[in-house]
Structure formats: structure tokens, C-alpha cells
Amino acid sequence: MIGCAFLYRISQALSDAKECKEPFGGINMIFAGDFAQLSPVGDSSLCSHVQTERVSTTAGQNIVFGKLLWLSVKTVVLLSEIKRQEGTKNLRFVDLLSRLRAVYPDWSEAGWRNAPLIVCNNETKDALNSKMAAAFAKRSNQELHWYIAED
């Protein structure tokens, strides 16, 4: 997926090449893509909110101009019929893709129960460990005991 600043750079390059001040050098544009993809690296997503604290810089202004270019698109066609994975043998895979797209994983699936979690600080790790230990004790009908070690 392209971002706002990159869209603006594309428009500027086409305007320069065609010697035309109109967006995209007056060329009719067709955009195709998947908005469920990861956001562009080092750029703002076309669907993101403009961060007003960044508009005082040239890079921030390019993001705003790219966002305005995207908002000027008049016709959008959303494709909703799955073609690449169609067929009954792919139903589970299509269901998985749909849930991942919408960021709704099925947390009740057994694979998530023991999935490793990566966190960035000890406070979060300790809170998660406490919740997971309590959940495991409840699932296994065991009493939970806490033992605190002192150095």
C-alpha cells in the first residue's frame, strides 16, 4: 500500500512530466489495492487521520497534500467477492483471512491458549502472567498459590 506522502510525490512527478498543474498532471488515475494490508512503512496511511502537530514541516505538509489528493477520488468500487480462494476446500482458510482482516481472531481456538506473547516491559509481562496463571488455575480446577522470592 502507498502512503499519503508517496501519493503526493506521484502526483507531483506526473504534473512535472506533463507540465500541468492539475493533480496527477491531469491524467485519469485508477487505484487498486487492499486496505487490510499493513500500513506503509515510513508514511501515513491514506485512511489515517492527519496529525496536526506535523503540518508545520514540509514532510507533514506533503502528507496533508497526499491525503487531500486521496479524498478527491470521486469513484470507489469495492470488490467483495472472493475469487482467488473460492471453493469449498478453502472455506476455513477464507474464514481465517476474513477474521484476520477485520482483526477479530477467534481467541477460543486452542492454539491461542498457549501462544507466546511478546511485550515491551516487565509491568505488562507481570500483569499478563497473573491473568494467565489465574485462567489456567480456573480451567484446571486448581487452587492458585503465589510465592514471592526475595533476593
Image (tube, helix red, strand yellow):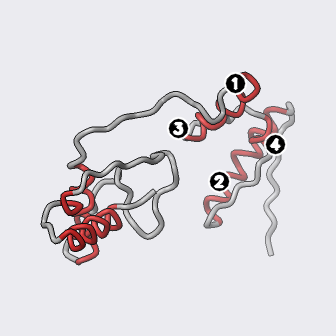
Q: Nearer the viewer, mark 4 or mark 3?
A: 3
Residue 134 percent coordinates (x, y):
75, 41
Residue 107 falls in which quadrant of the image?
A: top right
Residue under the point 40% across and 34% down: 78
Q: Is residue 19 above or below residue 142?
A: below
Earlier sequence position, callout 3 versus callout 1: 1
Amino acid residing under circle 1: Gly
Residue under the point 81% across and 66% down: 149
Amino acid residing under circle 4: Leu
Label 1 element class: loop
Residue 61 falls in which quadrant of the image?
A: bottom left
Residue 94 percent coordinates (x, y):
65, 32
CA separation in Å, label 4 and label 2:
15 Å
| For residue 136, side relative to residue 27 (left or right) | right
Amino acid residing under circle 2: Ala
Disc count in the image? 4
CA separation in Å, label 3 and label 1:
21 Å
Label 2 element class: helix
Residue under the point 42% across and 47% down: 32
Earlier sequence position, callout 2 versus callout 3: 3
Q: Nearer the viewer, mark 4 or mark 1?
A: 1
Residue 70 percent coordinates (x, y):
27, 52
- The residue where tag 2 is placed is 127
Q: Is residue 32 above or below residue 62?
A: above
Q: Nearer the viewer, mark 2 or mark 1?
A: 1
Mark 2 Cα shell of 10 Å, populated few (<14), some (14-19), many (≥20): few
| For residue 127, side relative to residue 101 (left or right) | right
- The residue where tag 4 is placed is 144
- The residue where tag 1 is placed is 87
